[in-house]
Image (cartoon, rainbow, N blue to C red):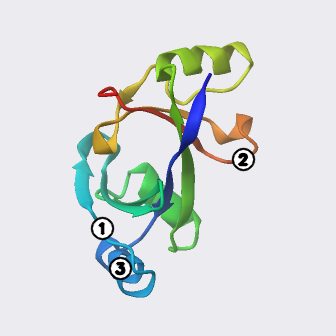
Amino acid sequence: MEISHIEHIGIAVPNLEEAIKYYENVLGLKCYKQEVVEDQKVTTAFFKAGDTKIELLEATSPDSTIAKFIEKNGGRGGMHHIAFAIEDGVANALKECEDKGVRLIDKAPRKGADGLQIAFLHPKSTEAVLTELCENPDK
């Protein structure tokens, strides 16, 4: 598996509009894109900090992974995952991880936000950090 860079850091937020205000008005970052990802039951907002993106995630359904994460976190948001850009394909990276005994959440790449192909590795196999593997199919 060839990782080129941290693609983004995912942060779960209970209120996307309030979080956007903080990132724009306090940190001086600019939200360049918002997107609803229906199958993940989230609305996302993206910012750039240097070469790394920050992805804010707000649940669109109480049964979404993000809603459950926020509930488990006492109603507060927080860092949800770290995503790495994979140069040699997410499918290849998943196979390599599985061969090394890593527990997979996704057995195959799927469509994610911002036009990426994504897959998640289970935090029980990744030092308690939810890890996302990302590939830009247009590159």
Asked whether, in this view, residue 126 is left or right of residue 32, the answer is right
Asked whether, in this view, residue 90 is left or right of residue 29, the answer is right
Q: How many marks?
A: 3
**Residue that mark 1 sits on:** 31
Residue lying furthest front: 50
Residue located 57% across and 49% down the image:
82
Q: Amino acid at mark 3?
A: Glu
Image location (x, y in percent) of residue 48: 40, 61
CA gap, disc 2 and disc 3? 30 Å
Q: In the displayed structure, would residue 81 be above or below residue 58?
A: above
Asked whether, in this view, residue 22 is left or right of residue 39, the answer is right
Res. 128 mark? 2
Tell me the SS state at disc 2: loop
Q: In the displayed structure, would residue 5 be above or below residue 19?
A: above
CA gap, disc 1 and disc 3? 7 Å
Q: Amino acid at mark 1?
A: Cys
Residue located 52% across and 74% down the image:
76
Residue 31 sits in quarter: bottom left
- Mark nearest the camera among 2 and 3 is 3
Quadrant (top left/top right/bottom left/bottom right) for the C terminus: top left
Res. 92 mark? none
Disc with the residue nearer the chain's start (1 vs 2): 1
Verify CB contact (< 8 Å) between mark 1 and mark 2: no
Image location (x, y in percent) of residue 136: 37, 32
**Residue that mark 3 sits on:** 24
Quadrant (top left/top right/bottom left/bottom right) for the N terminus: top right
Verify CB contact (< 8 Å) between mark 2 and mark 3: no
Disc with the residue nearer the chain's start (2 vs 3): 3
Verify CB contact (< 8 Å) between mark 1 and mark 3: yes
Front residue of this view, candidates 6 and 20: 6
Structural crowding at the residue carrying mark 1, measured as other residues with C-alpha within 10 Å and reported as few (<14), some (14–19) or many (≥20)? some
